[in-house]
Image (cartoon, rainbow, N blue to C red):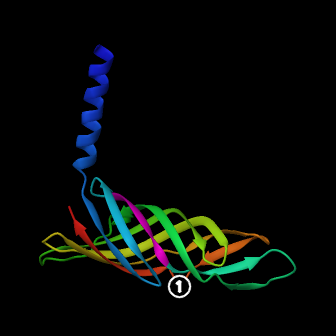
Amino acid sequence: MKKYFLVAIMAIACVAFVNAQPRAIGGRLGAFDGVSYQHGFGESNMLEIEAGWGWTGCVSTFEGGHAWGWGGHSIQAAITYDWIDPFGATFPWDKKGEWHWYLGVGGAGGFILNNAGFVGAAGRCGVEYDFWFPLQLSIDFRPTIGAAIWDGGVGMYWDVWSAAFGLSARYKF
């Protein structure tokens, strides 16, 4: 009985901890369109998860030379762990709302609609404005580099321009 009581107390504490953190949900627009969710861990860290559709970057084959081409339309997801205002650098701002910038690392993967998949490492660098009401606007750069896999073999995937730039609007709760 004591074990069940201890497990129940720990579960309640975990739920309270998760619910006490700031969160935001919204959309991301650019060459990659989709949904974006942020979950804060204190004031200096957050986890950002994105899923959606859009253009992909370049696919390069390892077979027979250096052939490459655009990946095309894709369905993809990314997750990054971001540091907010790293190195203690903040924007001086005495108006309503707050400016923040962030850097992060994580992973991304997806399915290119010409029967290829990709998985790789993702980075993130962005700036956001948190209004005094529950709205957040941000612009960021999220490059991805990794492996592309298709019926014909394996190659390299990279996206440093097309889906990498995005404008997001989120509801904070």
Residue 132 sits in quarter: bottom left
The residue beneath circle 1 is 162
Residue 128 appears at what percent x and percent y?
A: 30, 75
Q: What are the residue bounds of the magenta stretch?
A: 45-53
State the residue at coordinates (17%, 74%).
131
**Residue 64, how many percent across, how many down?**
87, 79
Q: Nearer the viewer, residue 58 or 42?
A: 58
Closer to the camera in the image, 120 or 103: 120
Q: Main secondary structure of the magenta part?
A: strand
Q: Residue at x 73, y 79 (%)?
A: 60
Asked whether 171 or 87 is in front, the reply is: 171
127 vs 150, left or right, is: left
The answer to whether residue 64 is left or right of residue 60 is right
In the rendered image, which quarter is residue 85 located in? Answer: bottom left
Q: For mark 1, give the secondary structure.
A: loop
The image quadrant that residue 140 belongs to is bottom left
Asked if 92 appears above or below 37 in the picture, the reply is below
Mark 1 is surrounded, within 10 Å at the Cα level, by few (under 14), some (14 to 19) or many (20 or more) other residues, namely some
Q: What's the residue at 48%, 76% (across, down)?
A: 53
